[in-house]
Image: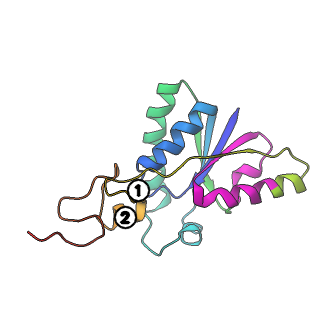
Amino acid sequence: MDVALGGTFDPVHDGHRALFERAFELGDVTVGLTADELAPETRHVERYVRPFEVRKRDLEAELARLAEECDREFSVRKLEKPTGIAVEPQFGALVVSPETKDGGKRINEIREERGRDPLEIVVVDHVPAADGDRISSTRIVAGEIDDHGELTPDRDGRGATRPK
């Protein structure tokens, strides 16, 4: 089965890795990586996002390792619209996180309008950080946690500097 998923992936973290692992369990994977122009529209917070080519390089390195372990193929394509690549007929499943599940429903509506079969929407739960809150790129960029959800040495997990 051909599996789609999409996102900004800046930086890649264990929550993303959980999405990728589930996608590779299902089949060959195509990742829609948000274009620089689209990234600000799809973010839930305002923050700097690294350029597409830098994010793509890091993403491909992660996917290559996982694809080899699973003996699967992958590709990364530029995502120009939020509904992106998943409306294309070759896909059978879409892997999403809980907050993007509604986007998956919208994609299936578009597919239905175009006379295509609906995608299987596979929701992968968030991965908790060491403090119990979810791992997110925003928390990583803010310096609260690392890409595995471990608290950074001088943070208490809520962004405050720990007393010394």
What's the amino acid at mark 1?
Ile
Which residue: 22% across, 65% down?
155
**On residue 31, which mark appears?**
none
- Asked if residue 57 shows in the view, the reply is no
Query: x, y (%) of residue 78?
Result: 61, 54
Viewer-nearest residue: 53 or 81: 81
Q: Residue furthest left?
A: 164
Q: Is residue 38 left or right of residue 139?
A: right
Which residue: 59% across, 61% down?
99
Colouring method of the image: rainbow
Query: x, y (%) of residue 13?
Result: 41, 50
Q: Are marks 1 and 2 in contact (CB under 8 Å)?
A: yes
**On residue 135, which mark appears?**
1
Q: Is residue 59 left or right of residue 30?
A: left
Q: Is residue 17 left or right of residue 74?
A: left
Q: Residue furthest bottom?
A: 46
Q: What distance separates the C-alpha of mark 1 from that of mark 2?
A: 7 Å
Residue 98 falls inside the magenta stretch: yes
Which residue: 42% across, 71% down?
48
Viewer-nearest residue: 16 or 132: 132
What's the amino acid at mark 2?
Arg
Report helix, strand or loop for mark 1: loop
Q: Which residues are magenta?
A: 83-108
- Asked if residue 12 shows in the view, the reply is yes
Q: Residues within 10 Å of mark 2 (few under 14, many from 20)?
A: many
**On residue 139, which mark appears?**
2
